[in-house]
Amino acid sequence: MNIPPGFNHDQQLVYGMRDTHPGLLEIMIYNPSKKNAIGVVPETKLTQLLNWASEDSNIKAILLHGGRNFSAGNDLSVFHSIKTRQ
């Protein structure tokens, strides 16, 4: 994967702003081995990014995408690791 200049790759997310599109925050879900399914850690990071964007007056729009695959939804393997309380 080619990460655009100035972008970050963190917790299965690639995000940043292109010089050619000021005010547009681009967030790409990047977990190709699971068709971009979102687990707890990337979901938390995505929430942090969206909260940050809502407070930054320089960000006018957000483009959320997944490249070739948008997202398969939640990563169901996470549910296998959750233990119910009794």
Image (cartoon, helix red, strand yellow):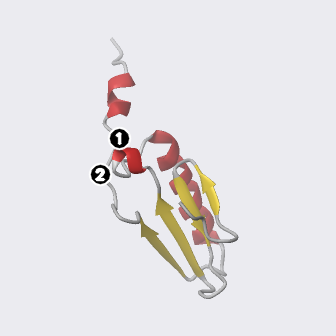
What kind of residue is marked 1?
Answer: Asp
Q: Residue furthest front?
A: 1
- Taking the image as shown, residue 32 lies to the left or right of residue 49, namely left
Decide which of 27, 40 is in the foreground and name it: 27
Residue at 33 percent across and 61 percent down: it is 69
Decide which of 66, 33 is in the foreground and name it: 33
Marks 1 and 2, how far apart at CA: 8 Å
Neighbourhood count class around disc 1 (C-alpha, 10 Å): few under 14, some 14–19, many 20 upward: some
Q: Residue furthest right?
A: 6
Q: Quadrant of residue 9?
A: bottom right
Residue at 56 percent across and 60 percent down: it is 14
**Image mark count:** 2
Q: Is residue 12 above or below residue 39?
A: below
Q: Which mark is residue 23?
A: none
Q: Which residue is mark 1?
A: 75
Neighbourhood count class around disc 2 (C-alpha, 10 Å): few under 14, some 14–19, many 20 upward: few
What kind of residue is marked 2?
Answer: Ala
Residue at 44 percent across and 49 percent down: it is 31
Residue 51 location in percent, x, y?
A: 57, 62
Q: Which residue is mark 2?
A: 72
Q: Secondary structure at mark 1?
A: loop
Residue at 36 percent across and 48 percent down: it is 37
* Dots 1, 2 in contact, CB < 8 A: yes
